[in-house]
Image (tube, rainbow, N blue to C red):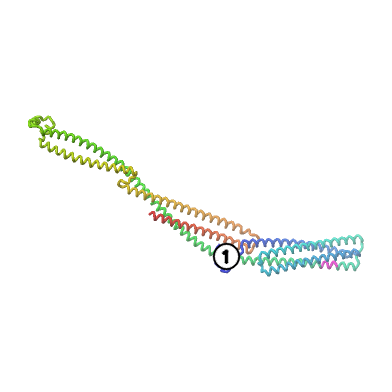
Amino acid sequence: MPVDPTTHQRDRFKPRKDKALLLNAGRLMERRENRELDELTAQIASLEKQLEEARAASASTAALSTTTGGSAVKQLQKEVSELKCKLSEAEAERDAATFAKESLERQDSRQGGGGGEGGSKQLQRELEESAKRLKAVEAELESARQEARKLQEQQVRSYAANGRKMDAAERAEYEEAMERVNVRLQTLEEKLAEEEKRTEIERHIERARQATRRAESAEDNLANARALAQTAKSAQKEVTALKKEKEQVEARLIELERTCADLQRALSETQDDLAEEKVLVGRLPREAQQRLGQAEKRHREEEQRLKKQLATITDRCALICQTLQLKEADVATIFTRGDTPLGRDLCKHGLRGIWSAYRDAQDSVVFLKTQVSSLASKVEDLQAQLDEQDHQSLPGSWPGTDDAAAAKAEIDRLKGELHAATLELANEKTRSTELRTQAAAESASLRERIARLEAQCPATPRSESAAPTASSTAQSRLVIERLTKTVEELNKQNAVLRNENTNLLLQLVGAD
């Protein structure tokens, strides 16, 4: 609950009465007053009825004044004196009850109208006791009147039966006694009227005290309402600031969505490049294997060709050696006969040409052997590279595989960060939706409560001065407290969202 800024520092920690409790106590007191008023009205009606009956009885006694009697009149006077004693005792009890009531009123006036809950309970108990005593006195008075009426009726019947009249002394004594009774009854009526008037005055005093207390509570409620209005203004400013921050957060979320879309496009492009690199890397072993097979095939063909040439050259060398060991007759025979291979060569080139051809053949054999050995070494190196590639099961030894692996690792890292950013964005959207839903539910519940309170306002019982003001201030206080709590919850949720957005931005900056 916000602190009242108008409250003094020394009065801030004093215990304050609950306004709802005070309102309920005021309603109960008003109902109690209404019940007491109804009871007093019923008592006045019963007393008026008794007064009419007493007047009728006095009229009957006046009618008896024309009759005469001796012992019956004495008996009647004795019974009248007994009734007077009972009436005096009842009046004494009534005076004691009235004195007790007046003492309670003086005690209540000393307490200043706000004597507390204990004093109110004690006053209520004493009022109930005085009401009980008053009812007992009225019952005794009613019984005495009934007995007087019975005696009068008996006297009337006795005089009517005897057929005689009273003498002057008995009639004067009887009239004096009846006059005293009538005076006593008149005094009782006056006292009852005074009691009724005093009760009405007390009721007006109590109502004035209640009105004073309600005015004081209304002033307190007005001060609280002003303080709450100030608090509501500050809360409205905070709500405006929160709306601005919310708009900024939404704009930042839109930027994050755009950034995530750009990252997704870059990721798709990188994945396409990676797929192409993977296809190229997959083709390299097959192409190398094909080139190796072609090189081996050329090596075998060249080896076979060289073997054939070597065999041919060897045969020719043997022939040349044989030719060099021949005699002139044999040489002449060879020159004359040209059907042999050596003869055909000799016919074409002569002996010097054959020797130069032999040396050229030896040089070509040496060159071919050198080429074959270099080609064999190249084939061995290529085979060793292929074996190493098969052993490592990775395309890292081929040209371009290091860049592909680095690109793949970078793409995997960007993909993980993009997935985390997407999850954070979805969570932010979910939280924003929940906040909007919660704010809408809170506003709807507040509108419903305000409508219920406004519907209940006209139904407040018997409260003309302070009840509407108190109910309206209670409604405004409840609404403002609910708004304050809602604003505090929105502030907390906004702080959490701000921290999460900051962390998400830091992660995205690190990813960039």
Of residue 47 and residue 356, the one placed in the foreground of this image is: 356
Q: Is residue 40 left or right of residue 239?
A: right
Of residue 189 and residue 242, the one placed in the foreground of this image is: 242
Quarter holding the C terminus is: bottom left
- Work out whether 23 lies above or below 368: below
Of residue 1 and residue 135, the one placed in the foreground of this image is: 1
Identified at 63% across, 58% down, the residue is 459
Q: Identify the secondary structure beneath mark 1.
A: helix
**Where is residue 200 shown, x and y percent of the image?**
71, 66
In magenta, the rendered stretch is 177-183
**Where is residue 277 shown, x and y percent of the image?**
33, 46
**Where is residue 341 shown, x and y percent of the image?**
13, 31
**Where is residue 138 shown, x and y percent of the image?**
78, 63
Q: Is residue 242 left or right of residue 410?
A: right
Quarter holding the N terminus is: bottom right
- Work out whether 259 lies above or below 128: above
Q: Quadrant of residue 71?
A: bottom right
- Residue 475, magenta (yes or no): no
Q: Which residue in the protein does label 1 denote? A: 224
Q: Quadrant of residue 68?
A: bottom right
Identified at 89% across, 67% down, the residue is 171
Q: Is residue 196 left or right of residue 259?
A: right
Amino acid type of the residue tagged 1 in the rendering: Asn
Residue 269 appears in the rendering: no
